[in-house]
Structure formats: C-alpha cells, structure tokens
Image (cartoon, rainbow, N blue to C red):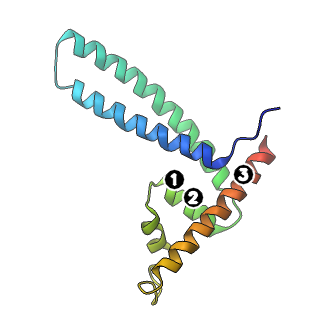
Amino acid sequence: MAKPQKFKERLTRYTFLLEEIRIEECRKNALSSGGDLLRRRALAGVCDELKLLLDKESEEYEALIEIINQVPHVAERQVLMARYMDGRTWPEIAAAVYGNRADYEERQQSYMRSIYRIHGNALLAANKIMARCN
C-alpha cells in the first residue's frame, strides 16, 4: 500500500510547477521576438508545453483549495492560502494577521513565531484531511 502523500510535499510540488510555468512564459516571450523557422518551431513547442502545464496547475490549484477549505480553523486556512496560493512571504503574512495590533512593532518576532506555529498546525490538519480522502 502506498504511503499517503503529505500536504507539504504536495504544496512544494505545486510551487515548483508555478516556477516551471514562469520559466516557460519567459521562454515564450523571448522566442516571440524572432521569425525564423527554428524560433517558430521552438515557440510552438513552448506554447504546447505551457498549455499542458497551465492545465495541470489549474487542476492542482482546485484540488489544493478543496483541501485547504476543509481545514477547520480560519487562521490556519488563511496562512495556507496566503503562503501557497497567493505566494506571500512570512513577514507579509505576519503583518496581514497581526499588523493592526498596537504592539506589533515591538513583538514582531513573537508574532512571526505564532505564524509558524499556525502554519505547522495547518499542515497537520491538511494531512489528516488528505488521509481521510485516500
């Protein structure tokens, strides 16, 4: 029996997929500026690959959102969404969650640790959700 896939591993693969799409889009833009046969062939190949990657990304995005939406705690869902689906940095996430608090500046590191803790709990919850679905 196959080991259940961990949610963090799945999120990591998703971010790699996003990076591959970004690189293919750069290749497409670079190849679009020429008109010789070799460039046109390469451009056609890149466009075909980009379509496949975008279809795969769309499918995985929907599957990840479905899992994230089942995480029971709002803060955990929001941290997962901000980090992986919106591509936000840890400091941006901490500022979004705690930035309106009067003591945010002096307790910024404490709030950052809290974000990491919320993130860890969110991953545990998502792993349980994935295990139930398998």
Q: Residue at x 29, y 12 (%)?
A: 41
Judged from the image, the secondary structure of the residue bearing numbered disc 1 is helix
Q: Separation of disc 3 and disc 1 at Cα?
A: 15 Å
In the rendered image, the vertical position of residue 108 relative to residue 10, given as above or below: below
Q: Nearer the viewer, residue 111 or 18?
A: 111
Q: Which residue is mark 2?
A: 80
**Residue 18 rendering spot, x and y as whole percentages:** 45, 40
Amino acid carrying mark 3 in the image: Asn
Counting the numbered discs, the total is 3
**Residue 6 rendering spot, x and y as whole percentages:** 68, 46
Horizontal side of residue 88 vs 81, given as left or right: left
Picture quarter with the N terminus: top right
Q: Separation of disc 3 and disc 2 at Cα?
A: 13 Å
Q: Which residue is mark 3?
A: 127
- Give the number of the disc on residue 84: 1
**Residue 115 rendering spot, x and y as whole percentages:** 55, 70
In the rendered image, the vertical position of residue 11 relative to residue 111, given as above or below: above
Q: Residue at x 53, y 79 (%)?
A: 110
Horizontal side of residue 87 vs 128, given as left or right: left
Horizontal side of residue 134 vs 83, given as left or right: right
Mark found first going from the N terminus, 3 or 2: 2
Amino acid carrying mark 1 in the image: Tyr
- Give the number of the disc on residue 33: none
Question: Tags 2 and 1 in contact by the CB under 8 Å rule?
Answer: yes
